[in-house]
């Protein structure tokens, strides 16, 4: 694994008492170079006081102004798979649930061993209520929180990972059986799935598991270059490697402790040589000073090294200008960008933090990326990620695909090697692949 050093390491009592979980724990502690004696066992009754003492639920602070230095705390954990009666009793006795919302609420559930092992994103809700052009899909999870320190992220005070991988995989199989329309499924958007490998072992288990499935594909989603353990695995092309990719300055100055732009591209080159389809998501695009020149250099380096299966792009989002200024070194940006954002917020307010940058500027950025992709690799599918219908309407001619037929990085039917406009929009925005 990469050299990460959790501040304190805990294990829930129900994970500690499980022999298979203990074995995974021992491998991970060896990877950290730490003795098992450093693992502090915590019971359910002790968890609330620990959560409050450590301030783990203060999840609204971006990493750019996190009050601590070093790596986050780590909690070894295990899914508890409650029955309905157990779930009701747990809700009644867990008062922290009433004190938390959104990601903090999800984190309380995860720390108690009762998160959902997947989440569902409703296409109707995204498109019709949030003006977000995206497909319906399920995502898989076994971890919450991240060891990376991207300054725009809110996942940095604690990480918890589930160790009962074997039981989890049986649930994954049932999820796939219940949703035959979803051919491609992503792991993991709540953490970085490659950081703790190969000691954690879940990525190997998933790659080899999906290699045995005829019509299902796995996406491993990361900012890491920790891929050497994957190169000799039998994957049969059923694992897709997906990186978020930022320009060199952003990867070094803003995405702290991640692999650099060049390291991610080199990791993709290795995986492509080993037969994995590779994809990139330019997310978030952070419009620092000289963003055009940096984007062009990044894309030239990318296409010189790999042949991406497809690409997508999404702009930076944040809550307001004050937060924007607080989480970044302002010298990285052209002052006019902040003035533009101040004028926009004063005139229009903050209607949607996921699309807070003015539409005209987002289009300007996307047009530059699209023009450079077309110059360097005209056949590579390119899409927008989680964008509005209006921006899609403007960009569709340049992208060569539209909001109801686009191929993208993590679309639920976007198997490898599809060409643009390969999707057919289905009920509730559950797409299928168009007939040849």
Image (cartoon, grey):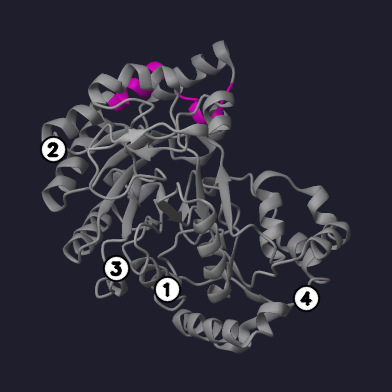
Query: Does 81 appear above or below 152?
Result: below
Query: Does 133 appear above or below 151?
Result: above
Reading the chain from its start, which is encountered first: label 2 or label 4? 4
Residue 209 on the magenta segment? no
Q: In which quarter of the image is residue 409?
A: top left
Q: Looking at the magenta stretch, what is its main secondary structure?
A: helix
Measure the C-alpha gap from mark 2 to mark 3.
27 Å
Pointer 2 with pointer 3, Cβ within 8 A? no
Using the image as rendered, state which of residue 346 and residue 349 is in the foreground.
349
Query: Does 96 appear above or below 209?
Result: above
Of badges 4 and 1, the one in the foreground is 1
Pointer 1 with pointer 3, Cβ within 8 A? no
Stretch in magenta: 351-366
Taking the image as shown, residue 200 lies to the left or right of residue 56, namely left
Of badges 2 and 4, the one in the foreground is 2
Which residue is drawn at the image coordinates 38% and 26% (left, top)?
403
Residue 359 on the magenta segment? yes
Helix, strand or loop status at disc 4: loop
The label on residue 43 is 4
Taking the image as shown, residue 43 lies to the left or right of residue 113, namely right
Q: Name the residue under label 2.
A: 377
Reading the chain from its start, which is encountered first: label 1 or label 3? 1
Q: Mark 3 points at which residue?
A: 235
Pointer 2 with pointer 4, Cβ within 8 A? no
């Amino acid at each position: 694994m990469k050299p990460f050093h959790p501040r304190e390491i805990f294990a829930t009592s129900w994970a500690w008492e499980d022999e298979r979980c203990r074995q995974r724990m021992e491998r991970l502690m060896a990877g950290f170079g730490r003795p098992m004696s450093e693992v502090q066992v915590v019971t359910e009754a002790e968890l609330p006081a620990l959560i409050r003492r450590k301030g783990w639920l203060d999840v609204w602070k971006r990493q750019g102004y996190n009050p601590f230095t070093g790596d986050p705390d780590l909690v070894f954990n295990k899914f508890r798979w409650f029955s309905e009666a157990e779930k009701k009793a747990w809700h009644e006795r867990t008062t922290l649930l009433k004190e938390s919302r959104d990601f903090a609420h999800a984190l309380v559930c995860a720390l108690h061993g009762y998160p959902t092992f997947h989440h569902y994103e409703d296409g109707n809700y995204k498109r019709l209520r949030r003006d977000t052009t995206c497909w319906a899909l399920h995502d898989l999870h076994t971890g919450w929180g991240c060891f990376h320190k991207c300054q725009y992220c809110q996942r940095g005070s604690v990480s918890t990972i589930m160790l009962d991988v074997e039981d989890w995989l049986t649930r994954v199989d049932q999820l796939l059986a219940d949703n035959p329309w979803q051919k491609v499924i992503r792991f993991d958007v709540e953490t970085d799935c490659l950081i703790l490998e190969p000691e954690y072992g879940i990525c190997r288990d998933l790659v080899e598991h999906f290699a045995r499935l005829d019509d299902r594909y796995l996406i491993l989603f990361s900012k890491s270059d920790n891929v050497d353990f994957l190169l000799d695995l039998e994957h049969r092309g059923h694992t897709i490697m997906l990186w978020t990719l930022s320009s060199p300055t952003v990867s070094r100055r803003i995405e702290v402790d991640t692999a650099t732009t060049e390291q991610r591209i080199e990791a993709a080159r290795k995986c492509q040589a080993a037969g994995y389809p590779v994809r990139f998501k330019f997310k978030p695009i952070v419009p620092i000073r000289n963003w055009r020149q940096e984007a062009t250099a990044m894309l030239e380096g990318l296409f010189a090294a790999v042949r991406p299966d497809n690409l997508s792009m999404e702009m930076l989002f944040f809550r307001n200008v004050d937060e924007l200024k607080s989480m970044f070194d302002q010298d990285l940006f052209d002052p006019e960008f902040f003035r533009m954002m101040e004028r926009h917020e004063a005139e229009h307010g903050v209607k949607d933090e996921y699309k807070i940058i003015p539409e005209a500027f987002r289009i300007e950025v996307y047009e530059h990326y699209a023009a450079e992709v077309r110059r360097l690799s005209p056949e590579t599918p390119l899409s927008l990620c989680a964008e509005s219908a209006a921006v899609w309407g403007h960009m569709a001619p340049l992208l060569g695909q539209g909001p109801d037929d686009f191929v993208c990085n993590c679309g639920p039917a976007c198997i490898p090697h599809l060409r643009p406009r390969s999707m057919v929009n289905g009920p509730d925005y559950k797409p299928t692949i168009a007939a040849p």
